[in-house]
Amino acid sequence: MPTTRYHQGKNLEEDEANAIGTEYFHSDQLSPSDAVQVRIGSRQYTDSPYPPYKSVHSAELRQINEKTGQLQNRLWVIVSGPASAQPTPVRACGLWQE
């Protein structure tokens, strides 16, 4: 059972790393100023003390989750504006992947 949880955690970390890399790669489809904001936000997200399971204090965990949520929301606002303004299939495939 512990090895299953370990592998599951590793798979989740790998999935998240791949998603961040994809986001970073696809930021080239945005305007230069939006692309810079996405790259900065991605770096801040990866520099944050995530994953939360490394924290043992509930107050610290709340702060980590709040900061992570704020970064995710900020990144979503940056990419959703241009994608909504020009809803082409290429933008849909490039920016809306999860």
Image (tube, rainbow, N blue to C red):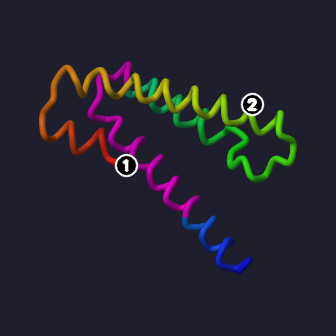
Q: Is residue 50 left or right of residue 87?
A: right
Q: Which residue is mark 1?
A: 98
Mark linked to residue 63: 2
Foreground residue among 37 and 16? 16
Task: Tell me which segment is drawn in magenta.
Answer: 12-34
Residue at 74% across / 52% down in the picture?
Answer: 53
Q: Is residue 51 left or right of residue 23?
A: right
Specify the quadrant that holds the N terminus.
bottom right
Instruction: Where is residue 85? Give x, y as percent.
Output: 19, 20
Q: Secondary structure at mark 2?
A: helix
Foreground residue among 75 and 60? 60
Instruction: Where is residue 44? Give x, y as percent.
Output: 61, 33
Q: CA distance from mark 2 to mark 1?
A: 25 Å
Type of amino acid under label 2? Gln
Q: Is 26 colored magenta in this rendering?
A: yes
Residue at 34% across / 23% down in the picture?
Answer: 32
